[in-house]
Image (spheres, rainbow, N blue to C red):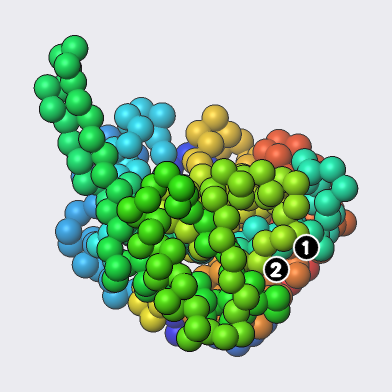
Amino acid sequence: MYKIAVIPGDGTGLEQVTEGVKVLNAAQHKFNFKMETFHFDLGGERYLRSGEILPDSVLEELKNFDAIYLGAIGHPDVKPGILERGLLLQLRFALDLYINLRPVKLFPGVLTPIKDKGPDDIDFVVIRENTEGLYAGAGGFLRKGTPHEVAIQESVNTRFGVERCLRYAFEYCRDQRQRQKLTLCGKTNVLTYAFDLWERAFHEISPTYPEVKCDYAHVDAITMWMIKNPEWFDVIVTDNLFGDIITDLGAMIQGGMGIAAGGNIHPGRVSIFEPIGGSAPKYTGKGVINPLAAICAGAMMLNHLGETAAADCIEKAVIAVCGTKLKSLNAGQMGYSTAEVGDLVAEAL
């Protein structure tokens, strides 16, 4: 029995998560495991209603679940940054979800904007350090609001944080990837303190994993090569900011935000799985949003919980639907409603 906390969030989040839960329910019946879901009212509506974002009591309750299934966060009536920092980042830091795991995989039948590239070329994973770097919140203002204002934002990189991220990447590459090739993404020629630490730790750890082939690339070069030669990559490991940027590029080359899912992970502890796109409030209630990213996030969650056969089967069902049914992955252009897409995947499963 798995206890799953469900946070639908804002906008189209509820519609996406509803279809994800539909597919998860189909999976539990097919593969004979049990899953109990508990919904939490967290997001923009609660903040506007009560001023609360993530009460301490709710945070403590969430720690007792096996996993958290998240829809999308972002409300048009809430200033950007409030919910993101107060809910998303707070959950990552409070639960110590130090890994952001982002598969970048082009499914057969899905279009990529890259000419002459297909599923055999676009199949890699980005592992992003998730609790340090520029997102740690270190810094501040001096003389704010004056002509002499100074704003400082510091990147915090600890040996502990860097090393545990790198070890996760090496082990993931060794255990779950056939090519076993790990690329460190950084900017050693300019960010000479932070990425000196990353590079030294990378090379000191690598002899422990002799099966893994290692290389390095600057982040700007990686953004070029992800477009020109995505087949070069197997697993990429990087810091918080660079990982945030290159995974959005990864989403585009795998077909768009409608198919991209991610996990915020602490191995062995409660972790969060979500579609990486936003809440798309303009589509709320219209039944046109693509739920496949949320469904894929559910598959990632099952894989994390050890239900690997169910996770693989969900991915195959998504591939079948993408390849034979959908006209597009874009909202309103799929040829089916949100609920119908969920039905198609559940039936394929």
Total marks drawn? 2
Q: Nearer the viewer, residue 154 or 51?
A: 154
Quarter of the image with the C terminus is bottom right
Q: Which residue is mark 1?
A: 319
Quadrant for residue 286, please give it.
Answer: top right
Residue 201 visible in the snapshot: yes
Q: Position of residue 302 (x, y in %)?
A: 55, 75
Q: Amino acid at mark 2?
A: Glu
Q: Position of residue 89 (x, y in %)?
A: 32, 52
Work out how far the residue at label 1 is from the one at label 2, CA to CA, in angstroms: 6 Å
Q: Nearer the viewer, residue 88 or 331?
A: 88
Identify the residue at image location x=35%, y=43%: 84
Quarter of the image with the N terminus is bottom left
Q: Is residue 118 above or below residue 177?
A: above
Label 1's element? helix
Quadrant for residue 287, please give it.
Answer: top right
Local crowd size for mark 2, using a 10 Å CA cut-off: few (<14), some (14–19), many (≥20): many
Identify the residue at image location x=23%, y=35%: 152
Q: Are marks 1 and 2 in contact (CB under 8 Å)?
A: yes
Label for residue 315? 2
Residue 276 placement, left or right of 114: left
Q: Position of residue 185 (x, y in %)?
A: 52, 56
Q: Position of residue 19 (x, y in %)?
A: 60, 57
Identify the residue at image location x=26%, y=44%: 154
